[in-house]
Image (cartoon, grey):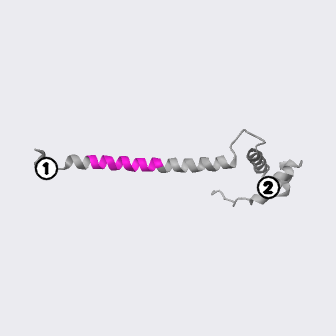
């Protein structure tokens, strides 16, 4: 069965639910009242606390974005390296198959 993908919740919606949790409401209570799961709400609270510096047991949103950018760059560089390696091998093979020039004798 294909998994359904739901669009991300708006940032303002997440901020309001985080504020409600920080004000004393439980994620489970909010999950019953609104659509997100209690675990999603807990994750948003944790991320909010990481971003504000209240916690240090994970990556901030900025660090996550940088990590994703760096992973994408590494993947691109690995692909370029593979292409260059194959090109170098092809040119090496082609250069050994060429007949000797008369001036090389």
Q: Is residue 74 magenta?
A: no
Residue 8 visible to an observer of this rendering: yes
How many numbered callouts? 2
Tell whether 86 sits left or right of 103: right
Which quadrant of the rendered structure holds the C terminus? Answer: top left
The dot on residue 84 is none
- Residue 21 is situated, as x and y percent measured from the top left of the image, at 85, 49
Q: Nearer the viewer, residue 64 or 8?
A: 64
The furthest residue to the front: 103
Question: Residue visible at 78% across and 48% down?
Answer: 45
Which quadrant of the rendered structure holds the N terminus? Answer: bottom right
Question: Residue visible at 85% across and 48% down?
Answer: 22
Tag 2 secondary structure:
helix
- Residue 94 is situated, as x and y percent measured from the top left of the image, at 24, 50
Q: Is residue 89 magenta?
A: yes
Q: Which residues are magenta?
A: 77-92
Q: Which residue is mark 1?
A: 101
Where is residue 59, by image quadrant? top right
Q: Which residue is mark 2?
A: 15
The furthest residue to the top: 57
Mark closer to the observer (2, 1):
1
**Cα gap from disc 2 to disc 1, whole angstroms:** 74 Å
């Amino acid at each position: 069965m294909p998994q359904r993908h739901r669009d991300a919740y708006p940032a303002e919606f997440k901020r309001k639910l985080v504020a409600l949790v920080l004000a004393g409401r439980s994620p489970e209570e909010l999950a019953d009242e609104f659509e997100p799961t209690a675990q999603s709400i807990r994750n948003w609270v944790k991320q909010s606390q990481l971003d504000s510096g209240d916690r240090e047991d994970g990556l901030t949103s900025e660090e996550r974005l940088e990590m994703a950018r760096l992973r994408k760059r590494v993947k691109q560089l690995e692909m370029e390296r593979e292409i260059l390696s194959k090109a170098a091998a092809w040119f090496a093979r082609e250069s050994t198959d060429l007949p000797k020039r008369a001036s090389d004798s």
